[in-house]
Image (spheres, rainbow, N blue to C red):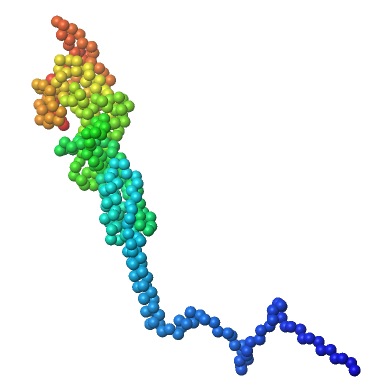
Amino acid sequence: MREQVIASRPVRRANGQGKGFAQRPMRRDGRTVEPRSFSVRALLGYVPRALKTALVILAIIGAAIGYRAASSASLFQIRAVDVVGTSRTSAEEIEGLVRRAVSRTGVWRADLSALSTELSRLPGVRTAVVTRVLPDRLRVRITERVPLAVVRTSSGHFIWVDDEGVALAEMKTTEQMPPFFILGWSEDGTNEARQDNAERVKKYQEALREWQAAGLTERVSEISLFDVRDVRAQLAGKDSQIEVRLGSQDLGQRLKAALDVLDQYKQTPRGALITYVDFQGDRVVLGFSSGGKVSAGTENANTTGVESSAVSANKKPQSTEKQGGNKPRLRDAGDKKPTNENRSRVR
């Protein structure tokens, strides 16, 4: 009797892979039944639209409440203020102002832009930048104004000013004095006055550079800048009653020429009566008082002007010669004596 061998059926492969083929149940219409999976989107499909809107509103309100609670928590209360960049400005004053400004809001909700603007209004502060250092610190970076000149006000006070014409602190007796002071400062406090004062500081810097280069700063005590087109220098020391009128340009060259003429005429008998030196193009006009010295700044002094064609920026009086006795007589170029033409002194 022959044995019957039954061959095994090969395993079906899905998609040509070695995986087993999983059979899926079939519907009566012949379509395969897909397994169901959880989906939030599908779940929301069963929720009414009004309920969806309410949930969104509740979520927003919850987030706002959580934000306020977190920002006002003790974690964000100000504990330290770091102030950097101060040398002349009081760091304690800045720290106190910052602490008062953020005492209610805390570090997280502090309005840094408004706080920076408020700090920039302090005297001596050009810019202020405030940044957060979470959770409980603020850092303030200060850029200070640099004092460049000292102004003598109408009330007699001496005030430091910067290059933008901003008045800073009053000059202390222990501070080093500048080469000379500024007169003619506008004290109105308007934007126009501030612009005018900035122009005065520029003219002051121009005069200072030129006079320092010529070695003349020690001869000047004040520079009058009521009008920057009519610069006037009040001399120092024994010549403190003399004003030199220079115009608006070539201040170093003109002052040197005027002082050269002044020093020559001071050797004459009337040298002590000179009250002003006026640079007029290629001529220098000397003004004399009628009967003696006039104190600096006197407005109503009676003066007489003496003009000589020989007294100019490039002409010096000739040497004296004796006449009759031993008294020297000043001779002008061309043997012309100074005339006695009366001039009113213009301040």
What is the residue that sits farthest to the right in this orientation?
A: 1
Pick the residue in front: 77 or 115. Answer: 77
Q: Residue at x 69, y 79 (%)?
A: 19
Q: The N terminus lies in which quarter of the figure?
A: bottom right
Pick the residue in front: 98 or 1. Answer: 1
Q: Residue at x 85, y 91 (%)?
A: 4
Pick the residue in front: 11 or 266. Answer: 11
Q: Position of residue 205 (x, y in %)?
A: 29, 34
Q: Residue at x 15, y 28 (%)?
A: 296
Residue 148, image quadrant: top left
Q: Is residue 264 shown above or below 48? A: above
Q: Residue at x 24, y 38 (%)?
A: 160
Q: Position of residue 124 (x, y in %)?
A: 27, 44
Residue 145, image quadrant: top left
Q: Is residue 111 shown above or below 280? A: below
In the visual, does 6 lie left or right of 243?
right
Q: Position of residue 98 (x, y in %)?
A: 29, 53
Residue 51, image quadrant: bottom left
Q: The C terminus lies in which quarter of the figure?
A: top left
- Image mark count: 0
- In this orientation, does residue 308 appear? yes
Q: Is residue 186 shown above or below 287? A: below
In the visual, does 253 lie left or right of 304?
right
- In this orientation, does residue 197 appear? no
Pick the residue in front: 209 or 1. Answer: 1
Q: Position of residue 279 (x, y in %)?
A: 23, 26
